[in-house]
Amino acid sequence: MMTCLLMLAGAASSGAEPVGGNALVLGGTGRLGAPIVQLLVERGYAVTVFARPTSDRGRLVGLDVSYALGDLLDADSVVEALRGRQFAVVIDATSRGSSDASFYATAMRNVLAALPAGSVDHFILHGSAGAGDNIAKFPQVPFGRMQDILRAKGRAEALLVTSGIDYTIIRNGVIRPDGTAASATARLTDDDSVLGTVSRLDLAVLTMQCLDNPDCRNKVFHAVDDGA
Ligand SMILES: NC(=O)c1ccc[n+]([C@@H]2O[C@H](COP(=O)([O-])OP(=O)(O)OC[C@H]3O[C@@H](n4cnc5c(N)ncnc54)[C@H](OP(=O)(O)O)[C@@H]3O)[C@@H](O)[C@H]2O)c1
């Protein structure tokens, strides 16, 4: 995986000092979060992974990262873990796991409360096509029980958008199976009627393309891989 990501994202750092600034990755131990962490380290960011004490760190073995420990559903633990911290970028790659749909809004509320205005330059949220009002763009899709999740993801998006922090929301439609190689044909579109298929590795690469990129600020994108 490492070679593939390096080729696509480029810009590995050879310096001893972090050149990208401080980055916080929520869900950094997960299937989408871990490749994002890897690429950030390669770009020269000093990466902090927010994780639960019980989180499996296996995907991050060998990467020079630090950990902030807490539970995103426990507001006090999030405040404690992030107190006084400043981040050039916060990237949210969480998924609810066994928690109910309200996870997304509760976690976002807790994180924003722990990161006051001025402590974060840019917040990148991985969300879902169909989140919030966007569901109206897909009347033909039988979302079924996903509707509760999409409503909660919409509430999380709204909290971020109104937070005053510069944001980028990257919505995915269908995620290709874990381990699917990056394709180099994935892209972001501001057409919010796109329900694309994309791999996690491509989502990680697309995330990197929004770092220090003014064209990504305060935008909502849908990720799609025309070659998939
Ligand atoms: N459209 C699709 O086909 C599709 C399919 C799957 C996922 N997705 C979306 O893709 C994104 C990434 O999903 P993924 O499957 O890559 O994620 P994942 O592998 O399930 O990883 C989820 C991450 O969130 C963390 N997390 C969960 N609850 C937490 C809590 N209470 N406190 C702190 N951390 C917590 C997990 O840590 P622990 O190890 O402690 O649990 C883990 O690091 C999500 O937005 C998800 O909804 C879309």
Image: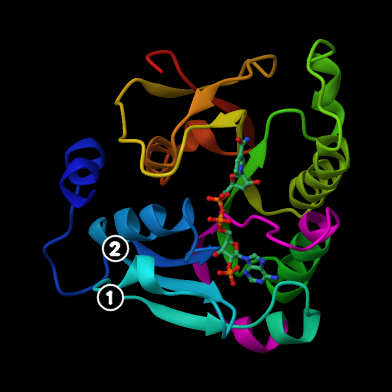
Q: Secondary structure at mark 1?
A: loop
Q: Report the side of 126 relative to 33 (left or right).
A: right
Q: Report the side of 206 relative to 164 (left or right).
A: left
Front one among 10 and 106: 106
Q: Amino acid at mark 2?
A: Val
Q: Quadrant of the C terminus?
A: top left
- For disc 1, the neighbor class at 10 Å (few under 14, some 14 to 19, many from 20) is few
Q: Which residue is mark 1?
A: 64
Query: Which residues are drawn in magenta?
Result: 79-105
Q: Which residue is mark 2?
A: 41
| 183 over 52 or under it: above or below | above
In the rendered image, the residue lying farthest to the bottom is 80
Front one among 50 and 120: 50
In the rendered image, the residue lying farthest to the top is 140
Callout count: 2
* Sequence-wise first label, 1 or 2: 2
Q: Mark 1 to mark 2: distance in Å?
A: 7 Å
Q: Position of residue 16 (x, y in %)?
A: 15, 74
Q: Report the side of 221 relative to 71 (left or right).
A: left
